[in-house]
Amino acid sequence: MAKIIVVTSGKGGVGKTTVTANLGFRLAALGKRVCIADADFGLNNLDVVTGVENLVVYDIVDCVEGKCRAKQALIQSPVNKNLYVLPSVHSFARAGVSVENLKELVDGLSPSFDYIFLDCPAGIDVGFRRAVSVCSQALVVTSTQLSSLRDADKVLSILRSFRLDYVGLIVNRVRGDLVADGLVLSPEEIAGVLKTDILGVIPDDDAVFLNNAGMIPAECPSARAIRLLASNLIGGKNKLFNYKADYVGFFGSIRRSLRRNL
Ligand SMILES: Nc1ncnc2c1ncn2[C@@H]1O[C@H](COP(=O)(O)OP(=O)(O)OP(=O)(O)O)[C@@H](O)[C@H]1O
Ligand SMILES: [Mg+2]
């Protein structure tokens, strides 16, 4: 049976879809059978980020409405045969999916996968609660910005009422230069403030931003960070990406001032 994990954040635009897609790709590359499902009805973009947009035939609502079987809606990634994408509905008007509908769908897929990730919509409304209700674990993505931290804190307090097996924190878009200069909280400080286990740290990386579809290049800093995140998730280890490595010492201070003056 699969581990069923919601990727959530509260605040929008902090990297849920980016984390879901790239973590999914990485786990698939490690031989795990992975399904990434877009639970963001109406504003779906997991199909775009994973480069399968043009392969969508059926969507999640077609499954719920009985127009197709769940496996017919799954799209096998052209990049890795272990990775499947379950696309979301493209029209908000058709998004009448209940918790029971979604649970039945996810439970039906569970025997075929090692991991099922649900890419959650932003906010704490019905779409968030529906996604969390069918999962047993949660990954909360935050950036280092205070607005994102405040929303992550709210989400974490709501998640406590769902009796999940595990809740882990992913601090995304970390700027090692700003942390080294003491201008933003470090991921470790953020984990302390939010009183949550930190599972991954992902740097702010142009390679992610410029990548419109498919996998980020294997040797960029964010890809290294995703590799560590995946092995932490599989092995329960806690080796975090060294976001400060480029910004300490003499040359590091030069890089810091260059980046700040861009
Ligand atoms: N580590 C990163 N470095 C640089 N850019 C990033 C990083 N993570 C995410 N981004 C960029 O931030 C933007 C928002 O990311 P993403 O769509 O994953 O956020 P989201 O939380 O899923 O948003 P929404 O709440 O709208 O669903 C995208 O343009 C993405 O490329
Ligand atoms: Mg998203």
Image: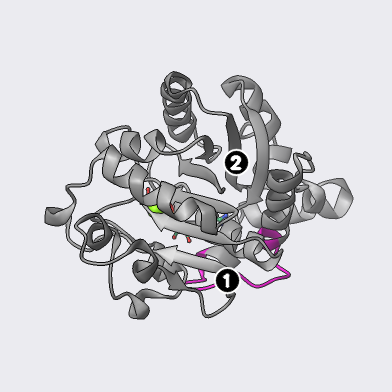
Based on the picture, tell me whether residue 234 belongs to the magenta stretch: no
Q: CA distance from mark 2 to mark 1?
A: 20 Å
Amino acid residing under circle 2: Val
Location of mark 1 (residue): 215
- Residue 188 position by quadrant: top right
- Residue 180 position by quadrant: top right
Residue situated furthest right in the rendering: 250
The answer to whether marks 2 and 1 mark residues whose Cβ atoms lie closer than 8 Å is no
Q: Position of residue 26 (x, y in %)?
A: 65, 62
Q: Is residue 237 above or below residue 151?
A: below
Q: Does the magenta stretch mainly form a helix, a strand or a loop?
A: loop
Residue 168 makes an appearance in the image: yes
Q: Is residue 7 above or below residue 146?
A: below
Q: Secondary structure at mark 1?
A: loop
Total marks in image: 2
Where are the magenta residues, as a range? 209-223
What is the quadrant of the C terminus in the image?
bottom right
- Residue at 27% in and 60% down: 63
Pick the residue in front: 196 or 231.
231
Q: Position of residue 162 (x, y in %)?
A: 43, 24
Residue 123 makes an appearance in the image: no
Drawn side of residue 54 relative to residue 25, left or right: left
- Residue at 64% in and 50% down: 202
Location of mark 2 (residue): 171
